[in-house]
Image (cartoon, rainbow, N blue to C red):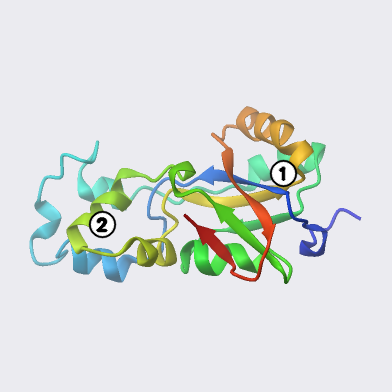
Amino acid sequence: KRIINRETVRPGDVMLALPSTGVHSNGFSLVRKVFAIGNGGENRNYPELDKSLWETLLTPTKIYVKPVLALLKELQPKAISHITGGGFYENIPRALKKGLSAKIDRSDVQVLPIFDLIAKTGKIPEHDMFNTFNMGVGMMVCVAQEDADKAIRILNAAGEHAYVLGELVASDEGVILK
């Protein structure tokens, strides 16, 4: 009964974001190219970052087990998606059943400064950024709309800074990011 089954997702369900700590382990070939790592670019100062480039890129990947287990004790999520290689466009649709799409207002995504810097430095289009990186969202948890506030409280009490990322709508577009 407690198995998370994407067949339970419905239009109007809410997606919650669990923030990432940075790039995690995806897109490093592109990161090395953008910053000319290995050719001296790694030593450049980037005032957009609160740490050195190395420290920012080597920030350990966040593990979401404890907050998700805390959520599972009190609530039944409908879907969960780890945002890894393939970013939003490949990972979120995997958690949704056919006929549903993730509708996300771009201004609701709490993008980390490293991703803005990668896009600017590498002149990478926004769509490509969201298709390669987690953009500051390490995991998406989908819950019924009426459970969203409670889920956020549970996740935040477990040490997360969860927030509403978007909602599910009837569509076959996968991710609608505007």
Q: Amino acid at mark 1?
A: Leu
- Residue 118's label in the rendered image is 2
Please state if 168 lies on the left or on the right of 8 as rendered: left
Please state if 65 lies on the left or on the right of 146 as rendered: left
Q: Are marks 1 and 2 in contact (CB under 8 Å)?
A: no
Please state if 95 lies on the left or on the right of 127 as rendered: right
**What is the x, y in percent for residue 163?**
57, 37
- Seen at 42% across and 55% down, the residue is 24
- Seen at 42% across and 45% down, the residue is 21
- Residue 105's label in the rendered image is none
- Seen at 14% across and 66% down, the residue is 38
Please state if 134 lies on the left or on the right of 50 as rendered: right
- Residue 69's label in the rendered image is 1
Secondary structure at badge 2 equals helix
**What is the x, y in percent for residue 17?**
56, 45
**What is the x, y in percent for residue 96?**
69, 64
Q: If the image is split into quadrants, where does the N terminus sit?
A: bottom right
Secondary structure at badge 1 equals helix
| Distance from Cα at disc 1 to Cα at disc 2 | 33 Å
User: Mark 2 Cα within 10 Å, few/some/many (few <14, many 20+)?
Assistant: some
Q: Nearer the viewer, residue 167 or 138?
A: 167
